[in-house]
Amino acid sequence: MQRLVIVSNRVPPPSGVAAGGLGTCILDALQDHDAVWFGWNGDLVSTESEITSACARYDRLTQITMPLTERDYREHYLGFCNAALWPVHHCRLDLARFAPGCIEGYRRVNLRFAKEVMSRLRPDDLIWVQDYHLIPLGSNLRALGARNRLGFFLHIPFPPPEVLLAVPEHLWLLNALCSYDVVGFQTNADRQNFFRFACGHLDGEPMSGNTLRIAGRIVTAVICPAGIDTHSFSEMAKSRRAAAEIERLRRVGEPLINIIGVDRLDYTKGLPERLRSFRRLLELYPQNRKATTLMQIAPPSREDVQAYAQIRQELEGLCGEINGQHGDVDWTPVRYICRNVAREALAALYRGSQVGLVTPLRDGMNLVAKEYVIAQDEEDPGVLVLSRFAGAAEDLREALIVNPYDLDEVAHAIQRAITMPREERIERHQALAVRVRERDAHNWMAEFLCALDIDRAPALSFELASARHRRAARHAWMAPRPAPAISSAVL
Ligand code: ADQ
């Protein structure tokens, strides 16, 4: 039987552990598939000779993982992936660092991963590589002789070509991207930027529809917005445990209105701007004092990168300032929680919050926006305030769309959300929920695989549609999956 082979930087254990957006969306989507998943297990060893791969089988999923060396971690993971590619792709050239030697680490790890995949590959495997850590993996596999269909999905934004040109060896990197048969993006804007780069700086030639001829090969560029497993998430939000959690929140918390933000602690998520907007809300609409609280959940990630340590300090300083300036003995304006929260508790917190504040400065998609919508009570839903710079804004037009840099605009939008009549909230929520359900994790995977597996595309569509049907039926009577514990946020 044809296997799906997934390769990503980090492989989360399949006990349903949230490992950030990529892990959430793959684990959710894989429920109906037999798959093999390759990647880093999160461990570090001193030398390459100590690297051995381990294979673990769970139901329909096999995971093959290996450690990185400390040098790989420094050069590949911190140095090139997170200090160079991540800021460039999020248009933060001011934070990008191109330390000498790091790109060699990136090449080395990609080649090692490719050799590991190659050693276990079957001729008819479909290969799907995930995200910016592994762009050259496809060309490595080709060089090692793989003839399989190769797909790649970029979870983060594809920046305008003028920005990408700042990456040393950008031509090598982008030529490597074009060695895949199918390249997937979150939004139309990302795909357009890719086409602009491929046609303006490589020898790409647009063909009909979404294909490109480049270096004698055809590359298909598809848009597949990442999503969540909406059935299980809405069941979680409605569970008894969630209801108890909401009740506890009401007892502990004095405010009538709860605003929630949930993000990995990352400078792309616009957290300081969000806190400043909340402070503007309290200044512009003082009736919110003692009546409204912002709960910001932000577990630290990538703390070995300097910019991440700085953002944490800034955020903690701001929380202290706002609470000191506006708080009172019986009211804490900002509740800041700097750790992971179990998924079921998260669902409950979304449901118990009247406003979901999702205001990244730039984001590939943003699954939190989708989770917030799906967790709401349909009869009395909260309102999503969403940054225009999140990929999710391309679809979720009935949210209150804001410019996260404009603090007053965000403050006015929050006030509008707080005071929005119930009929309008229901109307907006209904439209959003339909869109989030249409673009769920299963659809994300189905659309990509249909583009990748051209021969089996019709059969695959049918299989996926039936699986969705079965799932819907199952969820109608089944209890939700137990809420997973959350592991460390190494992404
Ligand atoms: P991320 O940047 O990690 O993902 P996002 O899409 O918001 O961002 O997903 C975060 C996930 O982690 C959500 O499922 C959320 O519930 C979970 N999470 C966040 N904080 C948590 C906490 N404190 N406790 C528990 N869980 C928490 C990358 C890209 C995004 C893209 C995704 C998927 O940067 O733009 O949407 O991949 O493609």
Image: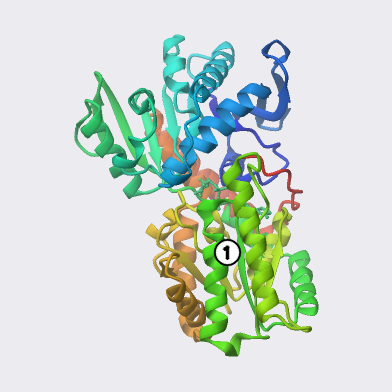
Residue at horizontal 52 percent and vertical 59 percent from the top: 270
Residue 118, image x, y percentages: 54, 13
Residue 374, image x, y percentages: 57, 63
Crowdedness near tag 1: few (<14), some (14–19) or many (≥20) residues, C-alpha within 10 Å: many
CB of mark 1 near ligand 1 (< 8 Å): no
Based on the displayed image, in which of its 4 quarters is residue 33 positioned? top right
Residue at horizontal 47 percent and vertical 65 percent from the top: 386
Left/right placement of residue 90 relative to residue 287 reads left
Query: From the viewer's perspective, is residue 404 above or below residue 124?
Result: below
Which of 285 and 219 lies nearest the eye of the viewer?
285
Residue at horizontal 73 percent and vertical 14 percent from the top: 50
Kindly tell me whether residue 378 is visible in this rendering: no
Query: From the viewer's perspective, is residue 470 above or below residue 218?
Result: below
Please identify the quadrant where the N terminus is shown: top right
Based on the displayed image, in which of its 4 quarters is residue 164 positioned? top left
Query: From the viewer's perspective, is residue 354 above or below residue 210?
Result: below
The residue tagged 1 is: 372
What's the amino acid at mark 1? Tyr
Based on the displayed image, in which of its 4 quarters is residue 215 positioned? top left
Which element is circle 1 on?
A: helix
Residue 439, image x, y percentages: 46, 53
Which of 228 and 406 lies nearest the eye of the viewer?
406
Q: How is the image coloured?
A: rainbow
Query: From the viewer's perspective, is residue 78 above or below residue 293?
Result: above
Residue at horizontal 42 percent and vertical 42 percent from the top: 89
Which of 360 and 469 lies nearest the eye of the viewer?
360
Residue 303, image x, y percentages: 66, 43
Kindly tell me whether residue 376 is visible in this rendering: yes
